[in-house]
Amino acid sequence: MISENFRIALLGLTSNKLRSVLTMLGITIGVAAVIVLVSLGQAVETFVRNQFLGLGTNLILISPREASLTDMRDGVAALVMTMRDYDTLRDISRVPDAINVMPQLNFSRPVNFDGRQANGRIRGVTEAFVPMRSRDVVVGRFIDRDDVETEARVAVVGLTVVERLFPDAYPIGQNIRISGISFQVIGVMERAGGSGFGGDENDLIWIPITTAQARLNTGRDASGERRVTNVIVQARDAESVDLVAAQARQALREARNISFRDEDTFQIFTQTDLLESVGQITGLLTIFLGIIAGISLLVGGIGIMNIMLVTVTERTREIGLRKAVGAQRIDIQLQFLTEATLLSLVGGAVGVAIAFAGSLAVSALSADLTVTIQWSSVLLATLISIAIGVFFGIYPANRAAALNPIDALRYE
């Protein structure tokens, strides 16, 4: 019975090839769109996750809390991070499970070399940057402890800076001027993947934080302590990140004399927190893209219902003849359901093939995104195609099965 229905369905589809192709087109586009857009959403999520992990592993970022209206009303001094906070956090008796602690000072200053100018993004750091951020130099060396202690006027530049300032010169040993102050280039950082979340990670100049504080960014808090943008703490392993975050919070609260009733004057972010937040955003993005693509499937399903109703009308005499020779109601229903499902399945199969081609095209056009089709997405698309064929084929099938055989035989 099933093979016979399948044979009849194939004959029906091939007898009107153009109409069948146009009907399947809606399902084809819908399935291809769903698979490509969902896979694209997953690729974006993977890219964002890799960007965060590329910043280093087991990191905890501690920065000043943004001043609230209550703070302003109560006359609270500007909420800042200082070198005193850095000294607190690197105290092994206060934060014993941290393996590295680094203050960071971010700012921008004009940079000049041999008549070329650039608005340089400067980052004051210590020698701990390389092990914490899992990056290294491609030529030269990075800032060392002596550079930090002696406030050396040395700089390490990113590859984008090299392209802007040294298109025809070897950068190592050259002297650049930052706000009119001479710095010797001692290293070039390896290329960072993607653009990062604080801008292009290759468009940076790293200098000793002590030099930055003494010569370029001399800001201090009310007590005279030198300011920093944030402090980064590295835990021993992924399992101890939350423990280190708790230790750092307690240490800063004690050092800042924050009572148990008052809220923190700083904020702590772990990579886990950031990844969870980003995962929720990208997950919603994937769902949104899937819903948009799903509208195409709905339109395709309506097209199948429409063409099946036309088919029922065209084959009214055939239905009457089948009933007259003993075909049951269920036989007629299965015949038209099979035809509707076959239309949907073939359209879905073509859509899957187009999705694979589309994913390869997107991956080829984007160096940062690798779009891969999950077999779970293919299975889901197949099930959706079957469901659409059955759902939108039920009404035409029931209408065909409900025809009176005598009236059907009289139909012209």
Image: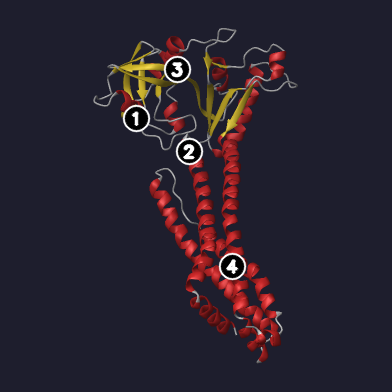
Residue 39 x/y as whole percent: 51, 52
* Amino acid at dot 4: Ile
- Residue 73 is at least partly visible in this image: yes
Choose mark 1 or mark 4, whichever is in front.
Answer: 4
N-terminal of the pair, mark 3 or mark 4, is 3
- Please name whichever residue, 290 or 15, is drawn nearer the observer in this view of the structure: 15
**Occupied quadrant, residue 137:** top left
User: Does 345 appear above or below 90?
Assistant: below
Q: Which residue is mark 2?
A: 51
In the rendered structure, the answer to whether residue 386 lies left or right of residue 187 reads right
Indicate which disc, 2 or 3, sits on the residue closer to the N terminus. 2
Q: For the residue carrying disc 1, how many other residues have a C-alpha within 10 Å: few (<14), some (14-19), or many (20+)?
A: many
Residue 182: image x %, image y %? Answer: 33, 12
Disc on the earlier residue, 1 or 2: 2
SS for callout 2: helix
The residue pinned by badge 1 equals: 159
Residue 175: mark in rendering: none
Q: Label 1 is placed on what type of residue?
A: Leu
> What residue would you read off at disc 3?
209
**Residue on which disc 4 sits:** 304
The answer to whether the residue labelled 2 contacts the one labelled 3, judged by CB atoms less than 8 Å apart, is no
The answer to whether 412 appears left or right of 233 in the picture is: right
**Residue closest to the eye, 321 or 197:** 321
Confirm or deny contact between disc 3 and disc 4 (CB under 8 A): no
Q: CA distance from mark 1 to mark 4?
A: 56 Å
Residue type, label 3: Ile
Task: Please identify, in this view, whether the residue under mark 2 or under mark 3 is nearer the observer.
Answer: 2
**Contact, mark 1 vs mark 3 (Cβ under 8 Å):** no
In the picture shown, does residue 369 fall above or below 224?
below
> Which callout, 1 or 4, points at the residue further toward the start of the chain?
1
Task: Indicate the quadrant containing the C terminus: top left, top right, bottom left or bottom right.
Answer: bottom right
Residue at point 56% right, 7% down? 224
